[in-house]
């Protein structure tokens, strides 16, 4: 009989599964976290759990928050389980399970309840994991998307904000009025300069409504940048069944991940922080070279093979990267073009880092789907690939491989693979991308002229010609032959 996961049953969880040995009743909230999805529950929670097990950071528990109805199932399941859930780490050699206890509760949809938590003096860090597309960034300017309807609504009615950032601003104003120290805002999303972008959104929105408040936030609130890394796929019925069969636990919200984590953080927390350096996090003065390494090698690495993998009919990431041509393509793109855009990092070998990344991509136990890796390309390409392309162009460096990566994405956006099977394009701009990708078969520039994604890149003749050449080759000769052509050149 499987043990139903909740506080009352913790002592009956089967041996071999780690459970909290600390007293959860002694935990108090220090974090309010927006976006309690799989990633934060496998990553940030792991570091906090390790800290609590040392008897440290007991005032740094987590309250989860969301303004979206789409997360209601996760909230309801976790509440039923007293906010306990299982994290399973898997690779070819290990499969271990651990019950996490640092999550203390949830507030959702009810803006007044979220605001009440935000002004609680015990909350000293507000953390965010809301996807790359959640920061209202104007693709053309890189600044705040001031014409976005949600931004306009929060500007016009600042007393009743509907966005996370509007609520943050209102809470900071109230804390100031009440003499409560402001919290630090910490983004965990895969964005270059994620703290800087979060500050841009918060201060920019405040500036539209109340310039004096914007100036105060800019002077008194910290937005540290950080780099996070752990491959965490989506959970399906397969994973829930495995937790029951392998570990004897009935858990409706388990998380599966690889046994690798990295968290590099700028040490800027004026309101205090947990001693995460005691459990493996790294605090540094300059995060930029670390995050560029990760974004341009790991995240862009995923992008460079996932579209090709989808077109060739692969379902899982590990299957695609184990294809000799796709693995050689990722290596060649990185070594010929991407590495050139990275500055040397003391003690770090980019070649060794790449090989470790490829090893992690090959983990057959994670079963990360190609569909998840290819999700929301219009958000991810401008964050992971196009900045590298712009830097390479500015330095007059080679861009043939980067142009090929964009051409593969364009071919993917036609929504059929090489066997004429339908591809479900999951993207906020899916219809526009598909229309342009089909038009690009005859006129390649049509795809690059989507300025919301590419900005002015379509005006660069060098890039446009390389893109057109590769896209034509893909349509005429196929994905594999085109990648082989790049490898030979």
Image (cartoon, rainbow, N blue to C red):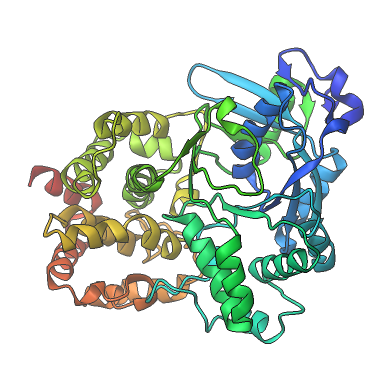
Residue nearer the viewer, 71 or 350: 350
349 horizontally vs 247: left or right: left
Q: Position of residue 469 (x, y in %)?
A: 14, 64
Q: Which residue: 19% across, 40% down?
A: 335
In the orientation shown, which residue stands out farthest toward the left? 489
Q: How many marks?
A: 0
Q: Position of residue 244 (x, y in %)?
A: 74, 26
270 horizontally vs 17: left or right: left
Residue nearer the viewer, 220 or 325: 220
66 horizontally vs 199: left or right: right
Q: Is residue 411 above or below residue 73?
A: below
Q: Position of residue 211 (x, y in %)?
A: 59, 80
Q: Which residue: 65% across, 40% down?
A: 41
In the orientation shown, which residue stands out farthest toward the right? 8
Does residue 375 appear anywhere in the picture?
A: no
Q: Is residue 460 above or below residue 2?
A: below
In the orientation shown, which residue stands out farthest toward the top? 15
437 horizontally vs 149: left or right: left
Q: Is residue 163 above or below residue 237?
A: below
Q: Position of residue 348 (x, y in %)?
A: 30, 31
Task: Please tell me in which quadrant of the rendered image residue 23 appears.
Answer: top right
Does residue 407 appear anywhere in the picture?
A: yes
């Amino acid at each position: 009989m499987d043990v139903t996961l909740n506080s009352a049953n913790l002592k009956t969880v089967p041996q071999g599964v780690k459970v909290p040995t600390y007293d959860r009743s002694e935990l108090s909230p220090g974090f309010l976290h927006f976006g309690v999805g799989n990633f934060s529950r496998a990553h940030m929670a792991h570091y906090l759990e390790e800290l609590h097990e040392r008897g440290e950071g007991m005032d740094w528990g987590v309250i989860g928050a969301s303004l979206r109805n789409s997360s209601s199932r996760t909230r309801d399941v976790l509440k039923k389980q007293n906010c306990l859930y299982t994290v399973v780490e898997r690779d070819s050699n290990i499969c271990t399970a651990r019950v996490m206890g640092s999550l203390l509760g949830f507030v959702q949809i009810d803006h007044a309840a979220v605001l009440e938590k935000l002004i609680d003096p015990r909350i000293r860090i507000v953390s965010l994991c809301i996807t790359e597309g959640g920061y209202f960034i104007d693709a053309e300017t890189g600044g705040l998307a001031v014409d976005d309807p949600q931004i306009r609504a929060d500007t016009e009615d600042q007393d009743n904000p509907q966005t996370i950032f509007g609520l943050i601003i209102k809470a900071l104003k109230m804390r100031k009025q009440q003499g409560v120290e402001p919290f630090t805002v910490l983004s965990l999303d895969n964005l270059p300069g994620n703290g800087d972008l979060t500050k841009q959104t918060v201060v920019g929105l405040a500036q539209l409504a109340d310039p004096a408040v914007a100036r105060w936030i800019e002077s008194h609130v910290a937005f540290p940048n950080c780099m996070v890394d752990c491959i965490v796929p989506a959970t399906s019925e397969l994973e829930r069944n495995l937790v029951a069969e392998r570990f004897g636990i009935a858990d409706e919200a388990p998380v599966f991940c690889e046994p690798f984590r990295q968290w590099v953080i700028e040490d800027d927390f004026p309101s205090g922080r947990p001693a995460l350096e005691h459990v493996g996090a790294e605090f540094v003065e300059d995060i930029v070279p670390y995050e560029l390494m990760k974004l341009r090698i790991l995240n862009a690495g995923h992008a460079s093979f996932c579209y090709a993998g989808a077109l060739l009919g692969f379902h899982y990431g590990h299957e695609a990267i184990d294809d000799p041509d796709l693995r050689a393509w990722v290596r060649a793109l990185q070594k010929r073009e991407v590495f050139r855009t990275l500055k040397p990092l003391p003690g770090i070998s980019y070649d060794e880092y790449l090989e470790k990344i490829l090893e992690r991509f090959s983990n057959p136990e994670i079963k990360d789907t190609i569909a998840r890796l290819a999700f929301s390309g219009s958000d991810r390409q401008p964050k992971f690939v196009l900045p590298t392309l712009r830097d390479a162009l500015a330095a007059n460096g080679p861009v043939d491989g980067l142009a090929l990566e964009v051409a593969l994405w364009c071919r993917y956006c036609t929504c059929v693979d090489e066997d004429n099977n339908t591809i479900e394009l999951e993207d906020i701009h899916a219809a526009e991308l598909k229309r342009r990708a089909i038009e690009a078969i005859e006129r390649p520039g049509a795809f690059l002229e989507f300025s919301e994604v590419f900005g002015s890149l379509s005006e660069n003749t060098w890039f446009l010609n390389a893109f057109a050449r590769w896209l034509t080759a893909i349509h005429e000769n196929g994905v594999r032959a085109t990648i082989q052509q790049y490898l030979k050149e």
